[in-house]
Every structure is written in C-alpha cells, then in structure tokens.
Image (cartoon, rainbow, N blue to C red):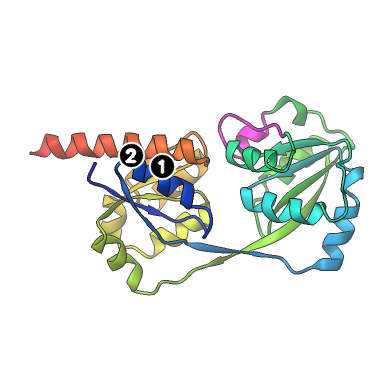
Amino acid sequence: MNHCVLLTRPHGSNEELSRLLKLSGIQSLERPMLEIRPVQKASQLKTQALNLDQCSCVIFVSRSAVRYGVELLEKYWPQWPKIDWFAVGKATGNALEEYGIKAAYPEQAGSEGLLDIEQLQNLNNKLVMIVRGRGGRELLATELSSRGAKVSYLEVYERIEIEYGEALPSDMFTHGVDLAVATSAQGMQHLLSSLTAQEIATLHLVVPSKRIARLADEMGCVHVHQADGADDDSLLQSILKAALLMQVGREGKN
C-alpha cells in the first residue's frame, strides 16, 4: 500500500506501531505533538501516595498515568493494598499488567465506557483516586461523585505542546503523509491547528474514541476513522481499513 502514516504520540510510544506498519508495507513518520513530563510536587504527591490504602478504587486514565503513577506509588508500597484497579482502555490496562496489576477496563476505550463498568455504579462513601495528567477532563470525577464517591486526583504528569513552526505541514506532505494517528484530544487539536482547512479536509485521521472523533469533525476533518482503542493492534487494524478504503476510492476515480 502506497501510504505514509503520521504518528503523533509522545516519543517512546510510536516504535511498536511503526514496526507493525512496516511489516504491513506501510511507511510512517514520527512527529510527536506533545511532550510528557513528570510533575514536580514531591511532598504533595507523597502524601497522596501514602493514602493509597484508604482508596477503594484507583483509576488510570492513560499509559503515561501508569508510567509515572506506578513509579511513584511503588516507592511507598512494595506490596499493593487490596484495591479495585481500573484502566480507561486496553492499552492502559496492558501497561498496568506489565507491573503485575490486573485492571478492569471497557471494551471501547474512554471515560464514557469506563463509567458503564458494573463495579463503578454504586460508590456511596467510597474513596476513588484518579491517576492522570494535570488539567485532564472532569467527566469521571463529576459522574463518580454523583454516584456517592469521594474523588481525589493524583496528577503525575503534564503535557507540553511541541511547536514545529511552519515546518510541520510541508514536512508532512513532503513525505507523502495521507494518514495520521492521534490518540489524545489535545494532541489531535494541536496537529489540526497547524494545518490549513484544505489539508484538514483531505487528511485521513485515525482516533481511538467517539469523543476525539467528534472533536476532529468539529475542526473540519472529513475522513475520521475510529479504532476500537488506543492500543497498537487496534490502531493498526483501523489504519489498514482506512488505507483500503482510500485505495478503493482512488481506483474508483480512475
């Protein structure tokens, strides 16, 4: 297939998908939209980490939350207390499993799917800790609070937008990019804000959730392909389906 896929996840998160694409005969170009940095609040984070055993549920909202959150919690908990662990999707759940943590997660990645899990329906007076980046969505906390939970945040990282200046669009299209992968709303919005309306309208975009797909549509992206999740296998299958549809469309015009 004569395609080039733009991979926009932070550095260190694109290697496996790039390898899978190469095996499928598809080129890729890595241009991260966001840089992930750990939050430097040692004393505050320590206090929250030490209160882990008071929680009934702990929710991780991303692989970065797992990376920085578990790294922090392991400093104070050589053995995990009895807690119900949750992940926002398969990719995050797989990341937790690498640390020996078995977490429940929804089939369709996202906060909306997570909120449908049975164990999160009745939370009267239960303490729930959400491990996330600074300034994340409030949907989970708002809805869980309405179900009786007492919610706290463990904010372990922050997202910094990477600026490419005028080089990014020309760089993309010089390499023949016609597909892009965006797994976070902020990263997707940062990518599309660097493109012209015409470029946005022609670009095919693979995203992991209905929410990000809706935001892309609102920004003028016509060709949005929703994967089953943010894990590499789900993204690969969506890319392959999108590439096939593009190929059929091109042949139909000839």
Which label is found at residue 32? none
Where is residue 152 shown, x and y percent of the image? 81, 50
Helix, strand or loop: magenta stretch: loop
Front-most of 74 and 187? 74
The label on residue 20 is 1
Magenta part of the protein: which range? 103-116
Depth order, front residue of 46/149: 46
Classify residue 81 as left or right of residue 139. right
* Amino acid at the residue labelled 1: Leu
**x, y (%) of residue 178?**
28, 51
Tell me which residue sits at (66%, 46%) in the image.
61
Q: Do labels 1 and 2 touch, CB within 8 Å?
A: yes
How busy is the neighbourhood of tag 2: few (under 14 within 10 Å), some, or many (20 plus)? Answer: few
Q: How many labels does the image show?
A: 2
Quarter holding the C terminus is top left
Q: Position of residue 170 (x, y in %)?
A: 28, 67
Q: Observer-nearest residue: 162 or 145?
A: 162
Q: Mark 2 points at which residue?
A: 24
Residue 88 visible in the displayed image:
no
